[in-house]
Image: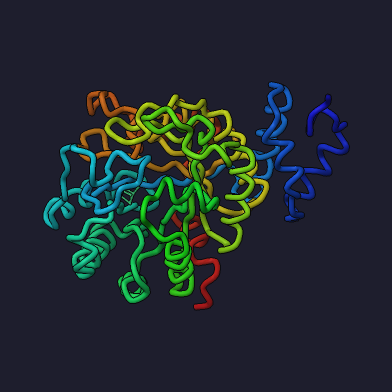
Amino acid sequence: MADFFSRMDDAKYNQFIDDIISKKPLTDDMIREMLSITDRDSLKKMSDAAVFVKNQYFGNSIYLYSFVYFSTYCKNQCSFCYYNSKNKIDRYRVTPEELRRMCEELKDEGVHMIDLTMGEDPHFHDAPEKLLEFVRTAKEITGLPVMVSPGVVDNDFIKALAAEGADFFALYQETYQKELYGKLRIGQSFEERIQARSSAKVAGICIEDGILTGFSKMKLSSGEPINPSVSDDIESAIVSIRGMQEADPDQVRVMTFEPQPGTPLAETAQASDLMELKVISILRFVFPDRLIPASLDVAGIPGMVDRLNAGANVVTSIISADSKLEGVVNFDRDVSLNERKRDAKSVIEKLHEMGLERGSQESFESYLNRNKTI
Ligand code: SF4
């Protein structure tokens, strides 16, 4: 049977793209059909359409975020995460002085934003001033916008982050299927997570949400599928895309679940990144004028290229060549630091090879400020 794109003639294909650019919504059936595509030519048509839509809103400009994972301590036990509190791993917490030194090094690297990320570390959660100081330091030293990813924090904490000048608040739901959420983010409230993002939006901070794919392969160490009743990645993606739409996020991401050593899901077979690439294109169709990241954390520069070719327009998880800090997934955990090639210079070189360019700081900041009235 002909699939969604192979049954379109050129006129219908162009009409589809025009409809997306004019923000005509996709139905669930359209998304389901597109996520079911396996034919190579049709996949290419889908990703080409996504890049065309991206170009209408952002041209050839790509934005770069520097990733500063400043504390790998966490009180939570997310079943998919290497840094969950039960995993017996070496952890670190950057000191204020270390952060200052890192910001001095980062300020001229060519990134557009500093992403300050941590696990839900009580050292910062119980003393918001310590995190506010980090935001202040990063902004003052680099002069760049700051994204903060502190986990779920209350409204007063968020207001204080806004007052300190935090520009972006990143908090990933991972899935909008509640039953599956309960098995991934063990013991954490589904609603409080949504509420934290909406508090950030009300406080005037841009928000990022994110989801995972690769659930159909997820298995607990017992061999049991993590969620047999909703194991279908396609239906999961549809529910989660609709869930993300509710809060009108400024940035949306999808990442393939990667089994992490020492976690309850360690024995899961790694899913291919095909579903992630399809979801990136769908995200571009559903959120045509929003930022969509290509993370270096999953498959490095080759993975970045695939994701930009699927419609992404931001490169995240950029780490300086000499950084000792971690990524979140760390496909390259075993690779020596100077071979990681996750630095801004390597990324910009590859962008040029692809005919893309580093966007201007001014255009990036005007995106961040597009909804501000003053
Ligand atoms: S995903 Fe975040 S909150 Fe969950 S265990 Fe990992 S660091 Fe902690």
From the viewer's perspective, tell me whether residue 164 is left or right of residue 214: left
Q: Nearer the viewer, residue 183 or 312?
A: 183
* Horizontal and vertical percent position of residue 24: 76, 54
Q: Using the image, determine if residue 153 lies above or below residue 178.
A: below
Task: Report the residue at 60% width, 43% height from top.
Answer: 237
* Horizontal and vertical percent position of residue 128: 23, 69
Q: Can you tell which quarter of the image residue 127 is in?
A: bottom left
Q: Nearer the viewer, residue 208 or 266?
A: 266
From the viewer's perspective, tell me whether residue 195 is left or right of residue 34: left
From the viewer's perspective, tell me whether residue 227 is left or right of residue 301: right
* Horizontal and vertical percent position of residue 121: 22, 56
Q: Does any portion of residue 346 appear in the rendered image?
A: no
Task: Report the residue at 53% width, 77% height from top.
Answer: 373
Q: Using the image, determine if residue 123 lies above or below residue 336.
A: below
Task: Report the residue at 61% width, 50% height from top.
Answer: 239
From the viewer's perspective, tell me whether residue 330 is left or right of residue 250: left
Q: Nearer the viewer, residue 266 or 323?
A: 266
Q: Does any portion of residue 22 appear in the rendered image?
A: yes
